[in-house]
Amino acid sequence: MRRIALAAVAASGLTVMLAGTALSDETDWGAYEVGDKRSGYTYAATETRSIQDDDFENPAMLWVDTGQELWDTVEGEAGKACASCHDDAAVSMAEVGAIYPVYYEPRGKLINIEQRINLCRTENMKAKAWKWESRELLSMTAFVRNQARGRPVAVKIDGPAAPFYEKGKEFYYQRRGQLDMACKNCHEDNAGNMIRANLLSQGQSNGFPTYRLKWQKVGSLHRRFRGCNSQVRATPYKAGSDEYVNLELFLADRGRGLPVETPAVRN
Amino acid sequence: MNESKHYRDVSRRQALIVVGAGGLAAAGLTLLPQAASADAAAVDAAIKGLIGGKTPQAGRITLDLPQIAENGNTVPITVEVDSPMTEQDYCKAVHIFADKNPQPGVASINFTPACGKAKASTRMRLAKTQNVVAVAEMSDGSVYTAKAEVKVTIGGCGG
Amino acid sequence: MAKPKPRVKVPKTAAKGEVLEIKTLITHKMESGQRKDKKTGEKIPQKIINKFVCAFNGKEVFSADWHPAISANPFMSFYAVATESGTFEFTWTDDDGSVYSKTAQLTVG
């Protein structure tokens, strides 16, 4: 802990104040807490939580609505909509949000939901892939993952996914950037402690894509990774890179059992 | 906070400009981005522009605001005015101000007796720790006001 | 920017005289006019929704004037008395003059 603080001061950009345990609360977090795993929801301010609690107060639902519309919209040379093959998303996509990323044989690597959507678009619909972080891709990803809301995260990490899981794990524990910090230094060692004025969470991924107050919109998990990596003064990887998809699998497993919350609301 | 004193000095002048230009609408045009902030005096001037020479009274307004806002981009506010909301006696409007934002005006909420209840919620941006002021205009011409401070936390892990 | 998309919660049915809570959201950046373009250093001009109106059967029930301090993807909730069956119409007016709208039916019985 001491080392982190010193590194941060030396780099002088980010003032890291690692105070003593900020919360010794006995709150019953219900489904948001599974064993020692706690959703980011449990670290959010009361007001932020209440925005997430009501689908008519949660602005991220605007993206989910857009996703629903796009689901039924015919696009591309094949003359298909998502619904042409997958019909009712509530049935066909019921599990997807809980089990992705998955190993994808034709590519010999993992793919996440965003990539699965774009594969469907380019290969089955003969439509253009959506850009990462575009309104369309965020909306569809939020819509698809929202179908699994409440289901416990249950990714597959054995079989062909195993080596990619290991790479994701390695990434998580690898120190990087000028501040020489790994994901673990904040989200394992200091979850529940203050970093300046903010409470560090366990960095769980079960609510993504999520509406961040800072962003004032919905954003992807990979956008968050890029932000974290920049904060430790490391060069972020590209959204959709193998590194981030592998990390996504490791994080999903780390939060195994937490319910899918998409679309969550976070600071 | 040392900072606030500095801003107060700067914005005192701007408050005069606002008064000179005669109201709230001018504030946005005269203030510079970032360095500028409104001020209690600017809020008073804006209120005066709306209600004229009347003296606001305390009471009847319930302001529900977080004491500490997690993020200044999205601060929830609920305002409720104690009123029977009948054709004869109702709350016409509630005006919301923030005294250290670049422009003091946040929103004006207009009720009718058809609302049944003079209560509304929205979300606002607060540039820094400051007072939020609500001014309620009643159908009989009386005016009420309430004020609450919201601390805005800055910094942490941006990402 | 894609066309703003509204989302509204109004009960479908109500008893006469019941006070209903209405919740509204709409996608909009609510560009405050305070930000600068990171590349050019130029101020980004203000572009917000400046007016929200809720009418019932053509008569205004509630309205709000919004300033740049209203958060992105603005939320507004308020109340209305159920008097008769009819149509709520919600309209949001943009600085550029565009009007976005949504309707909801209410049956009073």
Image (cartoon, coloured by chain):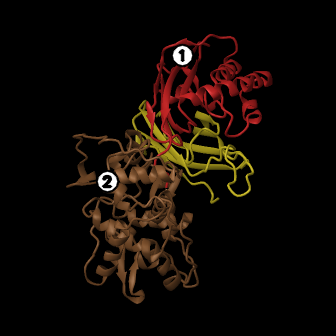
Chain shaded yellow:
C
Q: Which residue is mark 1?
A: B89
Have a look at marks 2 and 1 and say if they share a chain: no
Q: Does the image show residue C79? A: no
Chain shaded red:
B
| SS at circle 1 | loop
| SS at circle 2 | loop
Q: Residue at x 54, y 75 (%)?
A: A74
- Amino acid type at mark 2: Ser
What residue occupies the far left of the structure in this picture? A35
Q: Residue at x 38, y 62 (%)?
A: A182
The local crowd at label 2, few if under 14, some if 14 to 19, many if 20 or more residues have their Cα within 10 Å, is: many
Above or below, comparing residue B132 to residue A5 in the picture: above
In the visual, does A251 lie left or right of A36?
Answer: right
Camera-nearest residue between A265 and C40: C40
Q: Does the image show residue A51? A: yes
Coordinates of residue B147 in the picture (x, y in percent): 52, 21
What residue occupies the far bottom of the structure in this picture? A106
Would you say the residues marked 2 and 1 are in contact, meaning their CB atoms lie under 8 Å apart? no
**Tag nearer the camera, 2 or 1:** 2
Coordinates of residue A253 in the picture (x, y in percent): 28, 67
